[in-house]
Amino acid sequence: MSVSAPPLVICLAGPTAAGKSASTLALAERWPLEIINVDSATIYRGMDIGTAKPSPAEQAQVPQHLLDIRDPAQSYSAAEFRADALRLIDAIRARGRIPLLAGGTMMYYKALRDGLDDLPQADPALRAELEARAARDGWPALHAELARLDPVTAARLAPNDSQRIQRALEICQLSGQPMSALLGRQRAAAGDDGHRYLTISLEPSARAALHARIEQRFDAMLASGLLEEVRGLHARADLHPGLPSVRCVGYRQMWAHLDGEISLEEAREQGIAATRQLAKRQITWLRAQPERVIVDCLAADAVAQTIDAVAAALADAS
């Protein structure tokens, strides 16, 4: 008696500015897809320009999920993403359609494919305390504290990596153990959710060309009203630089400009540099994946290559 293979889930991943949106729309013209967005920025309502969120017209072309599901004052964890994505995968299949995960938040892909570590949930009061200390002493001081409590984790974090330093200190205080020790004990092993994941990875053959794309895209966002979008968020009394939404690349730099800390040109330069660093981290993560189909995102026929890769994957799975 043969055992059927687990259902295939295709993931279209790549660094920022790789052309994932164009490929997604082209794929939707060929197959009855529904898109599950894998993006920790497009989840926020009112953050459209700086996140390169699909336009209303693009959203009308294909059903899209996990867009605009949180207010910028709220958080959204990898655990919540995993639960939502698994629920959506099953629901989309039940409708006779094909789920396609698309986006560049690699932490979400990791949570979905490899499972979640048994880490304590976020504690708003403790986070507020850590943010207050950081405002007073600076994140490098908290990084030094983390180095005493969890030198393994501190060694891989930059002194100003506020979000990860905060989370690591939070875990240390809530669990009484270093995060690096807890991370070794996976609660859910890869593959036990009943799906087989295949990553189609849009990667640049020339880093400099991707960097040029990133600069052009950031300037286009500024021309489209990024500063005005952030100004509207900045006017809200319930938003502050410690929130994950405000830490998003582009928003963080424009916020600092509106706070009078840097000029608009400095905000632009820092935003472009931060986007390039984000792309570097995304590419590094993708290249460490054991199974992926690589498409040169800079090739003239990148969209056609992506269509061919999806067609081959679906044919193999049928």
Image: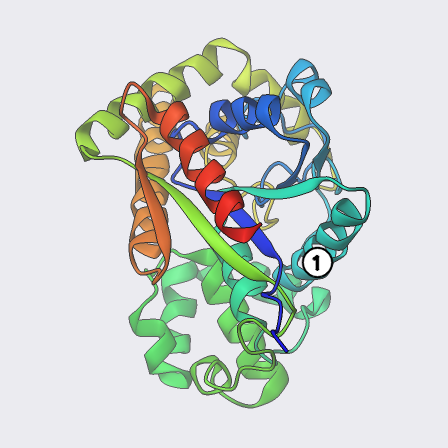
**Picture layout, residue 76 above or below residue 53:** below
User: 32 or 146, which is in the foreground?
Assistant: 32
Q: Residue at x 55, y 61 (%)?
A: 196
Q: How is the image coloured?
A: rainbow
Whether 304 is drawn above or below 159: the answer is: above
Q: Is residue 264 visible?
A: no
Residue depicted at x 70% and y 59%: 80
The answer to whether residue 174 is left or right of residue 285 is right
**253 w.r.t. 26: above or below:** below
Residue 2 is situated, as x and y percent measured from the top left of the image, at 60, 74
- Up/down of 314 relative to 30, above or below: below
Q: Is 222 displayed left or right of 144 in the figure? A: right
Corner quadrant of residue 45: top right
Q: For this rendering, which residue is in front, 249 or 284?
A: 284
Judge from the rendering whether residue 84 lies leftward or rightward of residue 208; answer left or right.
right
Front-most of 295 and 222? Answer: 295
**Is 236 displayed left or right of 282 in the figure?**
right
- Determine the residue located farthest toward the front in the rendered image: 1
Q: Would you call the spot at circle 1 few (<14 residues within 10 Å), some (14-19), or many (20 or more)?
A: some
Q: Amino acid at mark 1?
A: Leu
* Number of dots carrying numbers: 1
**Is disc 1 placed on a helix, strand or loop?**
helix
Q: Is residue 210 visible?
A: yes
**Residue at left 68%, top 19%?**
61
Q: Measured from the top left, where is residue 63 in percent x and y?
A: 73, 30
- Where is residue 205? Give x, y as percent: 20, 35
Residue 81, how many percent across, how many down?
66, 56
Which quadrant of the rendered structure holds the N terminus?
bottom right
Nearer-the-camera pick, 305 or 128: 305
Which residue of the protein is positioned furthest toward the top in this rendering?
223
- The residue at which mark 1 appears reads as 86
